[in-house]
Image (cartoon, rainbow, N blue to C red):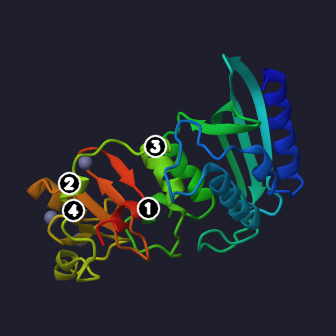
C-alpha cells in the first residue's frame, strides 16, 4: 500500500466509525498488532479493536474520532488520535454519567497487506488513569484505597497495553515457578485483623498468600513480595485472573494462568 492509500484507508475508517459502522474494522484493521502477532487461541487485533470500539460506542453513542498531523516515517505514518464523546451509556460495569470524555493519544500506523496495523505510542500511566477516570473505570484519586463504587472490569487486553506499554508479552523467567493458581480465602487477613478495608485482592502464585493490592492503604501483597521475594501475583477480584510480576514489571493475561490451573 502506498502512503496515499494508507492515509485514504485511515480517513475511511474514521469516517465509518464516526457514522456508527464499527464493523468497518473487519475490512480495515489487520489481524496482527502493530508490533506483535497474536499466538494461537489468542484474540487477533481485528477482534480486539472491534470489541473495544463496540464497548466504547455503547458507552458513548456520540463517540467521534479524529486523526491529525500524520507524518510519514518510511512506510509508517505517525500522528495523533483524538476520541471525544459523552458517557450516556454503561462501560465495563460502570453506569452512564452524562460526562464529557476526551482522549488524545499518539498513534503509529503501518500497512499490513491491504489493511493497517495500529499502535498507541508513548502512553503514560498517570495520563491513562486520568482518562479512565473520565469514564468511571478508575475511582477518583482520594478513593483509590477504598472498595470501588462500581465493580468495573476493563478488558485484560487494555490493562496489558497500559501496564506493559504494548501488546507483546514482556520477558519473565518466573512463570514456570507458579505453584498455586486458586485462592483459599477471599479476604486480606491482615487488614481484617487491623479493621481496615481494601479495593482488591492479590494471590501470591508461589505460596498462596492473599493480600490487598497496591492502591490499598496497607499494600499487603507488595509487602509480602518485599519480605519473601515471591515474584508473581494474580488478581482475584471479580473473575479476574491476570498476573503481575513485581521484579519484571510484567503483565500477563489470564490465558497465562490457565496453563497452571
Ligand atoms: Zn518475572
Ligand atoms: Zn491488607
Ligand atoms: Zn508468597
At 34% from the left edge and 65% from the top edge, which residue is drawn?
257
**Residue highlighted by disc 4:** 178
What residue would you read off at disc 3? Answer: 168
CB of residue at label 2: within 8 Å of ligand 1?
A: yes
Q: Is residue 7 above or below residue 185?
A: above
Question: In the drawing, does residue 13 fall left or right of residue 37?
Answer: right
Residue 4, x across and y down, in percent: 84, 23
Residue extending farthest to the top is 74
Judge depth for marks 2 and 3 and give the one in front. 3
Reply above or below: 51 against 110: below
Q: Quadrant of the N terminus?
A: top right
Decide if residue 51 is on the left or right side of residue 182. right
Residue reaching furthest to the left: 228
Q: CA distance from mark 3 to mark 4?
A: 21 Å
Q: Residue at x 51, y 60 (%)?
A: 41
Marks 2 and 4, how far apart at CA: 10 Å
In the current view of this chain or complex, which residue is farthest to the front?
Answer: 40
> Circle 2 sits on which residue?
231
Q: What x and y, as percent, mark residue 56? A: 70, 60
Kindly report the distance in space between the C-alpha atoms of the residues bearing marks 4 and 1. 34 Å
Of residues 195 and 74, the one drawn nearer to the viewer in this rendering: 74
10 Å crowding of disc 1: few (<14), some (14-19), many (20+): few
Q: Position of residue 144 (x, y in %)?
A: 42, 63
Amino acid at each position: 500500500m502506498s502512503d496515499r492509500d494508507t492515509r485514504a484507508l485511515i480517513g475511511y475508517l474514521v469516517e465509518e466509525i464516526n457514522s456508527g459502522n464499527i464493523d468497518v474494522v473487519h475490512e480495515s484493521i489487520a489481524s496482527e498488532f502493530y508490533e506483535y502477532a497474536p499466538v494461537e487461541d489468542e484474540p487477533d487485533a481485528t477482534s480486539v479493536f472491534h470489541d473495544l470500539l463496540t464497548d466504547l460506542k455503547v458507552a458513548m453513542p456520540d463517540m467521534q474520532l479524529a486523526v491529525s498531523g500524520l507524518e510519514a516515517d518510511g512506510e509508517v505514518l505517525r500522528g495523533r488520535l483524538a476520541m471525544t464523546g459523552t458517557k450516556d451509556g454503561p462501560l465495563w460495569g460502570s453506569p452512564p454519567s452524562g460526562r464529557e470524555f476526551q482522549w488524545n493519544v499518539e498513534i503509529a500506523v503501518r500497512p499490513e497487506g491491504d489493511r493497517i496495523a495500529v499502535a498507541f505510542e508513548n502512553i503514560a500511566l498517570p495520563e491513562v488513569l486520568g482518562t479512565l477516570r473520565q469514564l468511571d473505570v478508575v475511582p477518583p484519586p482520594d478513593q483509590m484505597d477504598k472498595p470501588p463504587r462500581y465493580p468495573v472490569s476493563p478488558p485484560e487486553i487494555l490493562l496489558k497495553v497500559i501496564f506493559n506499554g504494548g501488546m507483546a508479552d514482556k520477558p519473565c523467567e518466573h512463570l514456570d515457578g507458579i505453584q498455586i493458581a486458586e485462592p483459599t480465602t477471599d479476604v486480606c487477613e491482615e487488614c481484617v485483623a487491623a479493621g481496615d478495608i481494601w479495593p482488591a485482592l492479590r494471590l501470591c502464585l508461589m505460596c498462596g498468600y492473599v493480600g490487598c493490592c497496591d492502591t490499598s492503604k496497607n499494600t499487603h501483597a507488595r509487602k509480602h513480595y518485599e519480605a519473601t521475594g515471591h515474584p508473581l501475583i494474580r488478581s482475584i477480584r471479580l473473575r479476574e485472573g491476570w498476573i503481575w510480576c513485581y521484579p519484571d514489571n510484567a503483565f500477563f493475561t489470564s490465558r497465562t494462568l490457565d496453563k497452571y490451573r
